[in-house]
Image (cartoon, grey):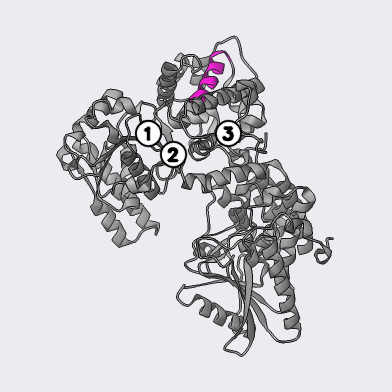
Amino acid sequence: MTNYETLDFTDLLAISTDGVVTHSLVRDVTLPSGNILALVTLDNGIDHTRPNTLGPHSLLEFDSLLVDLAARARNGEIQAVGITGKPYILAAGADLSKVQDIPSVAVARKLSQLGHRALGRLAELGVPSFVFINGLALGGGLEIALNATYRTVDASAPALALPETFLGLVPGWGGAFLLPNLVGIENALKIIIENPLKSNRMMSARDARDLGVADVMFDSVRFLEDSLQWADGVLGGTIKVKRPHEPSKAERLVKWDIAIKMARSMLETKLGTVAKAPYVALDLMSAAKSGTKADGFAREDEALATLIAGDQFSASIYAFNLVQKRAKRPAGAPDRKLARPVTKVGIIGAGLMARQFALLFVRRLQVPVLLTDINQERLDLALAYIHDQIATLKEKGRIGDDEAKRLNALVSTTTNLSDFSDADWVIEAIFEELTAKQDVFADVEKYAPDSAIFATNTSSLSVDAIGSKLLHPERLVGFHFFNPVAVMPLLEVVRASKTDDAALATAMDTAKALQKSAVITTDSPGFVVNRLLARLLGEAMHAIDNGTPLAVIDGGLKPFGLPMTPCELLELVGLKVGAHVLDTHYAAFPDRFYRSDNLHALADHGKLLARDKKGAVTGFDKGAEAIIRGGSSPITQDEFRVRVEDGLADEIHRMLDEKVVVGAEDIDLCMILGAGWPFQMGGVTPYLDRVGASQRAFGGTFHTPLIRGVV
């Protein structure tokens, strides 16, 4: 077993020379009973805009302090140790800024070993240790708490999580062993596997308390005072800590393995087998049901070292940086000072998308939202839907009664376009027909103020063409949402040839207020996501029409690790919509996009997949298979995958030449946020470089040097 005390971390420190150090500041607190608690505050000396992180220098300082505190405990100078953080933040986990510079598995192993040595001391002080989770606690920050004897949490703490599997890693400072032994295997699976893979979902303070991560929760006003008083009660024996979620012997004998097996099956179904980290985490948690903590820590050392030195982590960090940095500073955005205020929103249409828009705009902007349609009955149904959704939000506790009333009051309907006379932002959400969109904007322009910005949610039509009947086409911008509107984070903001900076700046400002990640594109068929999906689906339909079985098509893209197969994607977007998208792209680029009569026949048939009564896919629809039967040139799964890879590389290269977006990173961001391209693949362009598709398609690469990742 590794002796952490004898390890030399010089080589680890050498790659972390310029990072911000989170210091461990200590002071003695005399508790009401007279006991002395040494209170350690983690603080990087920067305000709350820069969370505490734990790099090698920070960990060694923390480690050294705990050695000193253990000596003081032996001398009877202190009776407990408490850990908390600077205002609003405990710690955001390991400092990953230099992790990609780690040169070998051996050095990567030392990062895990140093974390285990430092944090593990919280259980070896000779006196109880308490962590007062006063705010953000992610990854290694939460593992500080898990290594302690007791934990309290501030009721206002915004996010607690072990998000490592989302980044291609595993909790490697004790989390994979300690958490299931604290809260039970099912709760641990939720926190370590399920939450990260659901768009990196975080726990609230209440979640942490209810799941057993924290022993008790206190209000913010007196959080530290109440935590210290509670700790004093625990030390004095007047407070008995009960942990109902701690696994029993029966759970370890029976429930544990069953839960792991079910989680593995779920992962294989939803994620495929491309991503490594979730399965490594499962193996660690499976082994955690027995054996010593030292055994568990040693397993974490090896697992984390292998993943850090491997390709998936490098790819995941590239994708993470896109979402965390580039998405927040969109390339090509004009000066925000040019944005016009939006004090009233007008929505043209009353269908499903229009209803979703209304709910999103009223919740995020908190301004009046007015829907219009030629049919009052449709408007009444739309308003009833919005009111029902607001009522559901209230029932779930996401909004209060007063806010529900306010939101309901802010939404109204009209059949009279003159009511748009004070709308600052007008967005259409009608069917994809060019003349209809042209005419509706020309009509509303007669009534809307000259300062109003117009937006179209078209997914494939030309924004320039839509604005051709406007007197002032410079105020029209594309504003392409993805369905479901409330969930999907991407917005493609389309700058047409006549769109001015004020319109674009207002669109970008509005996207930010809606809490969406916006990527600016030029006015090109399909913009980014639909253009690439059309190329992918075109390759699929071409192969199907030539006799390739549906099962081969769906199996061919499994190495991509996409959230759904090509057939599932077609059914999700709708077969008629899919046929329309392919037709649109074929009309624009007949040399490389594909039009399929079979797809139109499938659209008329209405389905492609067979499902059971609960909606689960059971295979392919027999009628659909009969429609596509024929073709004399079937291809294999590998041949289909290569055709898709080469087609995507070719199309992206053309898009960059056409300056559809500023750079390849924007295309990667669109595919991650709008098409579910997996984080562990690190973006579509690095993947195409790695598999040689870029070289085959255009004789080069999108990135130099190549970004490592899974192939």
Residue 123 visible? The answer is: no
The reply, left or right, for residue 2 in relation to residue 683 is right
Name the one closer to the observer, 249 or 140: 140
Label 3 and label 1: CA atoms lie apart by 23 Å
The reply, left or right, for residue 677 in relation to residue 420 is right
Q: Residue at x 47, y 31 (%)?
A: 528
Which residue appears at 70% of the width and 59% of the height? 177
Q: Which image quarter: residue 124?
A: bottom right
Sequence-wise first label, 3 or 1: 1
Q: Amino acid at mark 1?
A: Arg
- Closer to the camera in the image, 511 or 636: 511
Looking at the rendered image, the disc whose residue lies closer to the viewer, 3 or 1, is 1
Quadrant for residue 379, please give it: top left
Question: What residue sits right under mark 1 in the picture?
Answer: 495
Rounded to the nearest whole Å, what is the CA distance between mark 2 and mark 1? Answer: 10 Å
Specify which label sits upstream in the sequence, 3 or 2.
2
Q: Nearer the viewer, residue 351 or 682?
A: 682
Relative to 313, residue 539 above or below: above
Q: Residue at (25%, 48%) from the top-left corner?
A: 344
Number of on-image labels: 3
Above or below, 122 against 31 in this view is: above
> Over which residues does the magenta segment extend?
534-547
Q: Position of residue 626 (x, y in %)?
A: 51, 16
Q: Is residue 345 left or right of residue 107?
A: left
Residue neighbourhood size for the residue with mark 3, other residues' Cα within 10 Å, grouped as few (<14), some (14–19), many (≥20): many
Q: Amino acid at mark 2?
A: Gly
Residue at numbered disc 2? 332
Question: How many C-alpha atoms fall within 10 Å of the one at disc 2: few (<14), some, or many (≥20)?
Answer: few
Q: Are circles 3 and 2 on residues that touch, CB within 8 Å?
A: no
Residue identifier under label 3: 684
- Amino acid type, residue under disc 3 in the picture: Val
